[in-house]
Image: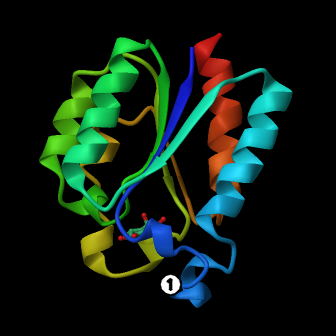
Amino acid sequence: KPVYILNGPNLNLLGKRQPEIYGRETLADVADRCAALAEDLGLTIRFHQSNHEGAIVDWVHEAREQGAAIIINPAAYTHTSVAILDALHAFEGPVLEVHISNVHKREGFRHHSYVSLRADGVIAGFGTEGYLLALRRAKTLLN
Ligand code: DQA
């Protein structure tokens, strides 16, 4: 069973965008670190990013067909997307929500997450290490 690692809008600019908040590591670096850990854990990953809500919905549907686990950083869609929440409600496997920054330390509009209504676990403020922690948890939950 694969683990889908899904990333929302503007995360393609990771490392360049507000580095004081999100750090200097790029999304390609994160993908490489996830791939290395996945290999150690004996997991297959599918790492994706899109700036388009519908593309993320489509990947959730694909994960559903495969009986996968999902690690998702929905980025700004966290706070707005009923469509992504509904797609996750149609998905039966583990869902782990990751935020690089501590959203609770930031503006009030970042304190509410639609995705958290479905997520089995949430990691925020652990930097990009949050993805690796979520991958370890996915391994536990898939077994
Ligand atoms: C984010 C937090 C969101 O509020 C923001 O819109 C992002 C990234 C994070 O990883 O900390 O784009 O999900």
Where residue 36 sits, quadrant-wise, is top right
Amino acid type at circle 1 is: Arg
Q: Position of residue 6 (x, y in %)?
A: 45, 45
Q: Is residue 131 left or right of residue 112?
A: right
The image quarter containing residue 76 is bottom left
Instruction: Name the residue beneath numbered marker 1.
Output: 17
How are the colours assigned in the image? Answer: rainbow
| Residue 97 percent coordinates (x, y) | 46, 45
Look at 22% across and 32% down and name the residue there: 87
Q: Quadrant of ligand 1?
A: bottom left
- Name above or below for residue 76 compared with residue 22: above
Please state which of residues 40 and 96 is positioned toward the viewer in this rendering: 40
Question: Relative to 138, does residue 76 appear above or below in the rendering?
Answer: below
Q: In the image, what residue occupies the spot 32% across and 32% down?
A: 60
**Is residue 74 or residue 15 the one in the foreground?**
15
User: Looking at the rendering, in which quadrant would you find the C terminus?
Assistant: top right
Residue 122 position, x and y percent, is 49, 46
Q: Is residue 128 left or right of residue 4?
A: right
Instruction: Count up the numbered dots.
Output: 1
Query: Which of these two is toward me, 5 or 135?
Result: 5
Mark 1, Cα crowd under 10 Å, few <14 / some 14-19 / many 20+, is some
Location of the N terminus by quadrant is top right
State the image coordinates of residue 124 (x, y, percent, origin top left): 53, 59
Q: Secondary structure at mark 1?
A: loop
Q: Residue at x 25, y 57 (%)?
A: 52
Query: Which residue does the image show at 48% across and 68% down from the upper left?
Result: 12
Single out the residue that lies furthest toward the right.
Answer: 40
Depth check, front residue: 36 or 75? 36
- Ligand 1 within 8 Å of the CB at mark 1: no
